[in-house]
Image (tube, rainbow, N blue to C red):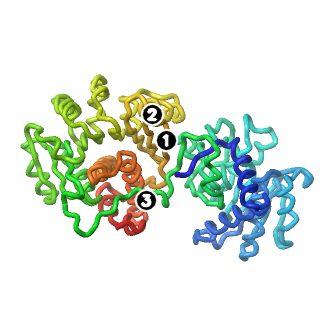
Amino acid sequence: MQKILKGSQVKELDSSHIRKSGQSSQELMEVAALGFVHWYISQSKFEEFPILIFVGSGNNGGDGLAIARILTNHNYNVSVIKCFENIKKLSPDALDNWNLLPDSVKIFDFENLHLPKDAILIDSYLGVGLKGDLRESSIPVISLINKFEGIVVSVDLPSGMPSDGFSTNICVKADYTVTFAFPKLSLMLPENGEYVGELVQVEIGIEESTFEQFDSEFYFILKNDIPKLHREFNRFAYKGDYGKVLIAGGSPGKMGALILSSKSALRTGSGLVTCHVEDTERYIIQTAVPEAMATWGLLANLDFYDAIGIGPGWGQEGRKHLLDQILEEYKKPVVIDADGLNILARNKELLEHLPKNSILTPHIGEFNRLVGEAKDHLDRLKMAKEFAISYSAILVLKGANTVISLPNGDQYFNSTGTKYMATGGSGDVLTGMITSYLGQGYSPENAAICGVFHHGLAGEIAGEQKRKGLIASDLIEAIPETYLLMDIS
């Protein structure tokens, strides 16, 4: 997992990497610029447009100047917009890259600049060093960038945004933010969403061991973290080895949620899925999901199941005693979502009966009812951490960058997903996936991480074709492809 450091630690991180690797600071800047350009060139929709690069006097401006040179060498039409008064104010590395600019790069002052409509604007003005309020001289620059009608790409951070908090000043509204080494905390806060746009992370060669000397409770889940978390099964494994899971949910008018959860558990790899449902609804589940079994009435022999998921479409009236029974009798971790969470919120005494390392998966509304309302997302993250520690639970706070809070205080931000997943039933799919992994013998932590990551990746796959037309069932159909992409057998 990639540690998420504070903005104040970035300079020290770079210095530590330079000492260990033998690279110079300019060489590190070059690697960052090359990573940005590699991403830029991969965006075919950009290739026909001239490029305007707004640069400041610091190292973020140095990144922009290096990017200008490299893009020019790739035959792009590049102009540099100078947002500082005097070349003598440039940082040493920025000055080196200024002197390396090809003669073909056109240079303009930002004052009295007429912005074309058909261009790509790269914001390389202010970086992670911003503290407190903006200087008055920065406001006209950012205001001009925000008047631009085309695509805006910010380098590392949108100019005007702090590394670790909320934008309280004027801030660049980017369509893309290409951040280096690790995503800064501010880029994953929903309050900053209108400024960040699509988030892209570019590796710049800083080894994981270099991050270890820095304290952080925040982590970013990377693609290469996932394969080692998956269990392997040999060719003699049978359906019982892949887990026997029970999903308690569904009620008249809400059977779709249980259908989605049970199907997603099966697609995720569960060997046997049983749905506990009202007897009047059992024919629906057996028709819609013939691979699943159905049970109704009394909850019996709970120890038979390797994992239990609770809540999708369950309803709340008359369910408290069933939830109480499960929590009292089942000693292994459970997965609780939707109406299961709402029942807990109305009956907080049940939280004391949660099996250790149970996984709760609220969206923000459910979080507010269960844990309490927060003044902002940073406060919400703190509350989620305290809840996970207090109840020895894993709390999965769903959102654009779903956050997994662990009982040891660590919090993991997910790196997969798409805005097109904001549709009814997505959470029910996630419940089935996490329950499936838990039933397959994954640790609760790994079940939550793998479930969240593959859920988001399935959304990306389905979203590529469906866009706004994506529905929850599309996520289920994309689950097998996530295994193909990750080369997981």
* Image disc number at residue 228: 3
Q: Secondary structure at mark 3?
A: helix
- Front: mark 3 or 2: 3
Q: Look at label 2 and name its amino acid.
A: Ala
Give the x, y percent position of residue 281: 10, 46
State the CA–CA distance, disc 1 to disc 3: 19 Å
Q: Is residue 157 above or below residue 40?
A: above
| Residue 230, visible in the rendered structure | yes
* Image disc number at residue 227: none
Give the x, y percent position of residue 72: 75, 72
Mark 2 in CB contact with mark 1 (< 8 angstroms): yes
Residue in view at x 63 percent, y 67 percent: 40
Give the x, y percent position of residue 471: 32, 56
Q: Which residue is mark 2?
A: 384
Give the x, y percent position of residue 333: 29, 40
* Image disc number at residue 411: 1
Q: Look at label 1 and name its amino acid.
A: Gln
